[in-house]
Image (cartoon, rainbow, N blue to C red):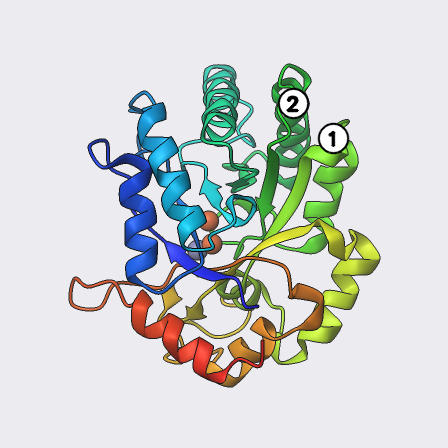
Amino acid sequence: MLIIGSHVGYKKDSGLVGSVEEALSYGANTFMFYTGAPQNTIRSSIDLDNVKKAYTLMEDNSIDKNNVIVHAPYIINLANGDESKFNFSCNFLSEELKRVDTFGFKYLVLHPGSHVGQGVETGISNIIKALNIVLDKDNSDVMILLETMAGKGSEVGRNFEEIKAIIDGVSKKNRIGVCLDTCHLNDAGYDLKTIDEVLDSFDKLIGIDKIRCIHINDSKNTISSHKDRHENIGKGTIGLDTLIKVIDCDKLKDVPKILETPYIDGKAPYKEEISLIRSLSKQ
Ligand code: FE
Ligand code: FE
Ligand code: ZN
């Protein structure tokens, strides 16, 4: 069965119950959320009663907790070697892992980081150092999913080789996975029309089993543009046929698919996009 959902909100008052309700309102069977605003560090304590209620709601509606994704905030940048920023990012990532574990979820999506002019190699070695520091003292089984990036600005992780270089340097390799993003892949220069070849090259370098999440977005820009601007499903340069081809890939069958497409006139497009995808998908 197709495992599909979208980014949903997480608010202090409604907590995880509110996130699950939002996902269900879109007809989704999974979802992704931030544990607080993605651009700041304010995080409320987790209400365990609320989490319990959310789990009941999930079970009643066949949402498997192992398919739920948490996205780490953008303010974490492990690639920046500046001491205070580096320490801040490590500490915040440690706390975020604990929150994901408290929720009982398995996956935390993380942007590898931006090297902010320090160079890709330095960026990669900073990321490796940070992941080893953070994972060394974390004994949960939460997996950090490195997201493949569009290569905007000084983003690291803009191709499979860079993702591989990071994973190669991490000691606890079983704690690291990968999150693909169709908009980012397109903008980074991967032609999704040839998704089988793209996945083959991923498999040879990293291993297909590392892919644990895929963000499904169309792109406002052409291939190799390095822009990272998401477009609604079927309205961008990737197009509906190719996105369905990606979604229906046998090799990605059990991987949760998460929409992060833009709101239309202030309204979430996810209900319509999920039903469009379901109507065309063979899964
Ligand atoms: Fe992301
Ligand atoms: Fe994404
Ligand atoms: Zn993006």
- Residue drawn where x is 67% and y is 74% of the image: 195
Mark 1 is surrounded, within 10 Å at the Cα level, by few (under 14), some (14 to 19) or many (20 or more) other residues, namely many
Callout 2: SS: helix
Query: Where residue 236 sits in the image (x, y, percent)?
Result: 40, 77
Please give the name of the residue rendered at 54% of the width and 68% of the height, measured from the top-left corner: 2
Between 154 and 52, the one nearer to me in the picture: 52
| Residue 215: image location, x then y, percent | 50, 59
Viewer-nearest residue: 243 or 185:
243
Relative to 140, 239 lies left or right? left
Q: Is residue 196 left or right of residue 226?
A: right
Quadrant for residue 249, please give it: bottom right
CB under 8 Å between discs 1 and 2: yes
Query: Which quadrant: the C terminus?
Result: bottom right
Residue 277 drawn above or below residue 58: below
Q: From the image, which quarter does the N terminus lie in?
A: bottom right
Please name the residue that numbered disc 1 is placed on: 170
The answer to whether 244 appears left or right of 272 in the picture is right
Residue 217 at x, y percent in the picture: 44, 66
- Give the amino acid type for the residue marked by disc 1 in the picture: Val
* Residue 232 tag number: none
Would residue 220 be seen by someone viewing this image from the given angle?
no
Query: Which amino acid type corresponds to the residue marked 2 in the rendered image?
Result: Leu
Name the image quarter holding residue 128: top right
Q: Residue at x 32, y 66 (%)?
A: 270
Distance between the Cα atoms at labels 1 and 2?
9 Å
Q: Disc 2 designates what residue? A: 135
